[in-house]
Image: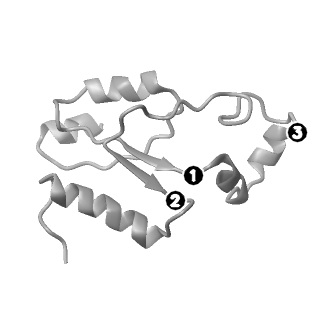
Amino acid sequence: MAKLFVDAGAFVGTAFISPYRSDRDMVRELVQSGEFIEVYVYASLEVCEQRDPKGLYKKARAGEIKNFTGIDDPYEAPEKPELVINTGENDLETCAAQVMKYLEENGYIDEVE
């Protein structure tokens, strides 16, 4: 769906939970060069566990959930993302500002006041 919007000239932001590089690489190949920006929204496993309102990490560690990313299934970090945002070290406003700055500096959007 996002590709249809991109093909129509729209700027599209999507959020994918994609633990495997091959899946992210496939999405990158669907669009033209410069039309895909991989933003690695990083948080350590410890931070992810602290933020877990449903207790899924605890259940995965107890063996109640199998193939859970980061516990008994791998997360393959991006090798060359265009942007890395560290949400464990920065608050929401700082993270959003980093994304906006990247988009402005690379000509995707005009300067935002």
Give the residue pinned by disc 3: 62
Q: Residue at x 28, y 42 (%)?
A: 37
Q: Is residue 85 left or right of residue 13?
A: right
Residue 39 point in image, percent of width and height: 37, 46
How many angstroms separate mark 3 from mark 2 (CA)?
Answer: 26 Å
Residue 84 point in image, percent of width and height: 40, 49
Quadrant (top left/top right/bottom left/bottom right) for the C terminus: bottom left
Q: Nearer the viewer, residue 59 or 4?
A: 59
Quadrant (top left/top right/bottom left/bottom right) for the N terminus: top left
Q: Nearer the viewer, residue 55 or 110?
A: 110
How many angstroms separate mark 2 from mark 1 (CA)?
Answer: 6 Å
Q: Is residue 42 left or right of residue 98?
A: right
Asked if residue 113 is positioned above or below residue 33 in the image, the reply reads: below
Please name the amino acid that badge 1 sits on: Ala
Q: Which numbered disc covers residue 87?
A: 2
Mark 3, residues whose alpha carbon is within 10 Å: few (<14), some, or many (≥20)?
A: few
The secondary element bearing badge 3 is classed as loop
Q: How many marks?
A: 3
Give the residue pinned by disc 1: 43
Asked if residue 9 is positioned above or below residue 52 in the image, the reply reads: above
Q: Are marks 3 and 1 in contact (CB under 8 Å)?
A: no
Q: Are marks 2 and 1 in contact (CB under 8 Å)?
A: yes
Q: Earlier in the sequence, mark 3 or mark 2?
A: 3
The secondary element bearing badge 1 is classed as loop
Residue 89 point in image, percent of width and height: 54, 63
Please name the amino acid that badge 2 sits on: Thr
Q: Is residue 13 visible from the viewing direction of this image? A: yes
Q: Which numbered disc covers residue 7?
A: none
Please name the amino acid that badge 3 sits on: Ala
Mark 1, residues whose alpha carbon is within 10 Å: few (<14), some, or many (≥20)?
A: some
Q: Is residue 53 visible from the viewing direction of this image? A: no
